[in-house]
Structures are given as C-alpha cells and as structure tokens.
Amino acid sequence: EYSKVQKIKKENLVPCILSYYKKPLLIHEGKMQWLFDHTGRRYLDMFGGIVTVSVGHCHPKVNEAAIQQMGQLWHTTNIYMHPKIHEYAEKLASKMPGDLKVFYFVNSGSEANDLALFMARAHSKNFDIISLRNGYHGMSPYVMGITALSTWKFNVPIGGGIQHTMNPDVYRGPWGGSKCRDSPIQTTRQCDCPAGACEASEKYYEQLQDVFRYSVPSGHVAGFIAESIQGVGGTVQFPKGYLKKAYEIVKSNGGVCIADEVQTGFGRTGEHFWGFEMHGVVPDIVTLAKGIGNGYPMAAVVTTPTIAQSLGSALHFNTFGGNPVASAVGKAVLEVIEEEKLQKNSEVVGTHLLLRLAQLRNEFAEIVGDVRGKGLMIGLELVADAQTRTPMSSTNFMDIWEDCKDMGLLVGRGGLNGNVMRIKPPMCITTEDADFTCEVIKKALENYLEKR
Ligand code: PMP
C-alpha cells in the first residue's frame, strides 16, 4: 500500500506539497492526541495537523455534531438563512471582547486574512498595510505579500502597498532577553530592561516608527497585521508592551489593527482565550482559522459594526463560508473547549511542559539555544553554537526530529532557518504526554551528541 500511495503522490499531486520526514508517514486514523499509521503504529501527535486539531482527533462530540448536521442539511449558501450559523455567530461573539461581534465566515486562514486586508483598505480608504518580518499569514496572492519568511521564493507578483517592519524577536533580534517576554519559564539569561520599562520593546518600536518616517511618509496606513506569537516563524514571542505601542501609532495614523489569531486563538496560550489579550490590546479585526474547526475546513473574520459597515451593501460573496456543517462543528468545538476546560489544561500542561523543556535547555545548553512559548504554543530552538546562536544545520536538525518520530513523537518544524521544533498539540494532552515528549526529545538529543 505504501509504495502505491507514493507513486500516486509523485504522479498526481503537485510537487510543492510539503511532506515531513525522509519517509513520509501514511496516517490512517486519529483518536484525540494520537495518530495511527498504515501499520497500526501509534504516535503522540504534538503538532495537531499544524496547530489545527484543537480538541482532539475525531473528538466524539464534534463528530456527533457534524454527522447529525450532515443528516439534516449540508448546504444552502447564505441566500437563505439557516439556524446553525446564527447560533454559532452568537456563541462565538460571546467569546470576543469589546465591540468585536460581526462575523464573516470563510474557509481558510488565507481567505480570512485576505478579507481582513480588504476590510482595512475599504474602511480606512488608505492602501498601505504594515506587517512583521518572519510572520506567516497564508498563501493567497494578497497575503503572500504580508507573509515575510524566505521559505517562499516564488517569482510572481504578490500584491502591493505592503511594508514590512523588523519583528521584535528577543532571541534572534538585536535587542532583548528572554525575560522581556510574557512566558512562565524562568531563565538565567538576563534581559537589559530597566525596571518598569522594556528597552527592547522601545527599540523595536523605533523600527516601526521608521516605516512611517521612510516608507509611508503620508502617515496614511490602511492597517497593521500581526500574529500574537509568530507561529510558522518559530514561536516568536514579542517583548512586553510592543504590540500595544504598535497599535497606538497605527490607529493614530488612521489604520486598523488586525490580529491574526489563526494559531493563537481558542485557548491555546492558556492564560487567555485569545492571544492578543496577553498584549493588553483589543484589535479592530481578528482572523480565525485552524483550531476553530478542529480540522474541519472553516475560518472567520470578526470586526466591529462600524468597520463591517464599510463593506456596505456591496456584494462580497463566499459560497461555502458559514455553511450548516461548519457552523455545527464550530459550535461543538467551542462547547468542548468550555466543558473540558481545555484552556485551563493548555495553561497547566503547557507550563509543565515549558518548565521541563527549560530543564532540557540547561542540560543541553550546547545545542538547545532557546525554549519559549505560552500554554500549548511552544518552540525549542536548536543551535550549532549557543554563544553565537548559529542555527543548527538542516541535516542535523532533521536527524533529531526524525529520531523523535521513530520513538513515536510527532512535532513540527519552523523558523526562518528551519531549526525550531514546534510543539502545539491538541489541547487535550495530559501531563504524562508532556513528560513522554520531554523524554523522547532528551533521548534524541543524547543520540545526536553521541553520534557527533
Ligand atoms: N495565519 C497563520 C498565523 C497561519 O499559521 C496560517 C497557516 N499556517 C495561515 C494564516 C493561513 O491559513 P490557511 O493555511 O488555512 O490558509
């Protein structure tokens, strides 16, 4: 079976589809935090289909909601009303702060961000969008432009009116230390911040001011978009206060602030339901995808009534967005997060995991450069030289990563240099799963050092 599937993949699927591992896994089944391959072998899934399986693979309650809805009504488009979308919009609105209560349902994160940029431009009547380097926002032509990771090297036009500013990365960037970030881990590395103010945050903020000074001298921006923790970019956390100041300068110049919560939403960061809350900001537009549907393809943009009004009565149409099955699934996901207290679980198990990984960093200080994150959104950065922070080579990283897989642990990979392990599992994992994860990573690091 395996070789037949490989042949089809080679002949009938585009070559740019990403496959993890030298010998990609053929997955047949998923159950909560577990995946099973074609031989029946079980893996602990600490990446959740790229931060998407929020409440667990094939969660029985979500399954039941989808199956029940499929037996009743699949699709109408929004030319007719159906109760599910209304029930869902009401429930999701109850999770949002401030005036964020108007939804536009779509089908993917890229579509959501595309629409958010469109809304920002329509509302502000300005054109320039500012985004952060090292951010990932999707793959449609508009949002490919705001995505700023060198991983995508297509020589095709990708939008216009986009300004990138330096991402405030306190590990790789020129300023800051790990204490600048809002994270439960205790480290020995010192931050340069004087008491009460984060100097690193100020420095990165000056970079953003320069965008206004040099690139958008009119000061008229349409908007600013940022993830609350950069996900694909390698779990990059911002220094305290940065986003708040960024929002202020953007708003004072007539722009709207967009929070890309595609990875950080729905309780994943533990302490808060939405990632932007850790920065003490309330965005004008929020985009949601991935975990919203636990793997069912769906996404949303939420904004204020005033901004929504700027789209007016012009036709802006989406055939599948907010269809009855997606709405039923979305509502069930929210109920499961509440009933099973998964946000709290992310905080408790995530903190446990971060603290244990921080011990590994101390134990393997030569090759583990950094451990960071919040809740169940974690990154472990491997380096060739801890002093210079030179990233570990791709080949060496892959040896360790593949070794983890062979020991039954699946984690993601990210960062500009591809040297960050990304740990973002379904939020139902247990402390035992976290311990297993650390044990496997520890063994893989030991194996690597032995072979070296
Ligand atoms: N925003 C972020 C933060 C993402 O991580 C992703 C996907 N990795 C997207 C947007 C795009 O989502 P999609 O792949 O569903 O288009």
Image: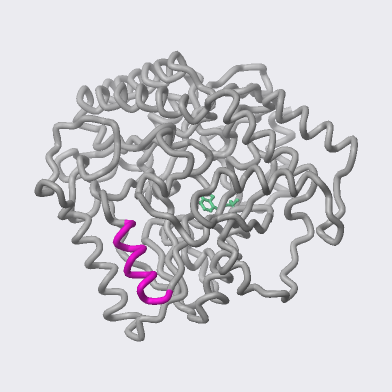
Q: Provide residue 266's location: percent of width, then percent of height.
A: 53, 39
Q: Provide residue 222's location: percent of width, then percent of height.
A: 47, 75
Residue 114 placement: quadrant? bottom right
* In-front residue for pair 360/199: 199
Up/down of 131 relative to 101, above or below: below
* In-front residue for pair 128/403: 128
In percent of the image, x 60 and y 25: which residue is there?
339
Q: Provide residue 427's location: percent of width, then percent of height.
A: 52, 28
Residue range of the region highlighted in magenta in the rendering: 243-254
Q: Left of 324 or right of it: where is 161? A: left
**Would residue 154 be seen by someone viewing this image from the given angle?**
yes
Q: Is residue 419 shown in magenta?
A: no
**Please, which residue is most extreme toward the bottom here?**
218
Residue 426 placement: quadrant? top right
In percent of the image, x 24 and y 46: which residue is there?
171
In percent of the image, x 20 and y 60: which residue is there?
202
**Please, which residue is most extreme toward the top here?**
432
Q: Left of 238 or right of it: where is 363? A: left
Please state, as top left, top right, bottom left or bottom right, where the C terminus lies in the image.
top left
